[in-house]
Image: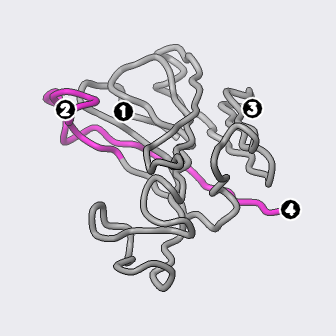
Amino acid sequence: MKVPMSAGRWSAFWMMPQPQPGRFPGCRAWVPGEGECGAFGGWPRSGEIDIMEHVNADLKVLGTLHWGTQSGQQASEGGNKALSAEELKGWNVYQLRWSCDAIEWYVNGQRMHFVQRAWVQPQWPFDEPFFLIFNTAVGGALTGYADADVRTAEMLVDYVRVYAS
């Protein structure tokens, strides 16, 4: 992947749980605030996996898990990997190794972070099916105002591989 390196951009390669409309009243597709929910209910209880996030021209990428606590609050655990501007402007390979007991993030073959099942309380929602999302958000509270190249900035994806074992 290649990500834009400019103000006001938030590129992401992430995963959300497969919607399960029949399990909870009001549950429909993943539309924020519209009754979205996976196996354990609405966000964040059913989890979110951020494989790669890059914000503005920061010289790092992020990988994070999100899940719900007993009180319904959002909890998260994540890590980051510093990359040079030259590395970020080039092609990079982002990998997620997902097992029943842990999730590991890799950037160009180097482990960036890992989370063990035991760290995620009260429940590990990552045993359910998830789907992939690629997007670049423009502007907002996290990124601030977008600069003038907003119409030409792009995130490029060369390939996606999914393996099961």
Marks 3/1: CA–CA distance? 21 Å
> Magenta residues, as a range?
136-165
Query: What residue is shown at x 66% (from left), y 42% (from top)?
Result: 120
Secondary element at image label 4 = loop
Q: Is the residue marked by circle 1 packed among few (<14), some (14-19), or many (20+) residues within 10 Å?
A: many
- Residue 56: x and y, percent? 32, 25
- How far apart in space, not on screen, are marks 3 and 4 (Cα)? 19 Å
Asked if disc 2 and disc 1 are in contact, CB closer than 8 Å, the reply is yes
Residue of label 1: 4
Residue at screen point 67% across, 52% down:
124
Q: Residues under labels 4 and 1: Cα distance?
A: 33 Å
The one of 75 and 28 positioned closer to us in this rendering: 75
Residue 116: percent from left, percent from top: 75, 39
- The type of residue carrying mark 4 is Ser
Identify the residue position indicated by label 3 in the image.
Answer: 109
Q: Earlier in the sequence, mark 2 or mark 1?
A: 1
Taking depth in this image into account, of 123 and 56 the one nearest to the observer is 123
158 in magenta? yes
Q: Is residue 113 left or right of residue 154?
A: right
Residue at the image point whose x is 74% and y is 46% from the top:
97
* Residue marked by disc 4: 165
- Asked if 44 appears above or below 27 in the picture, the reply is above
Residue 118, image x, y percentages = 76, 41
Point out the tag, 4 or 2, that comes first from the N-terminus.
Answer: 2
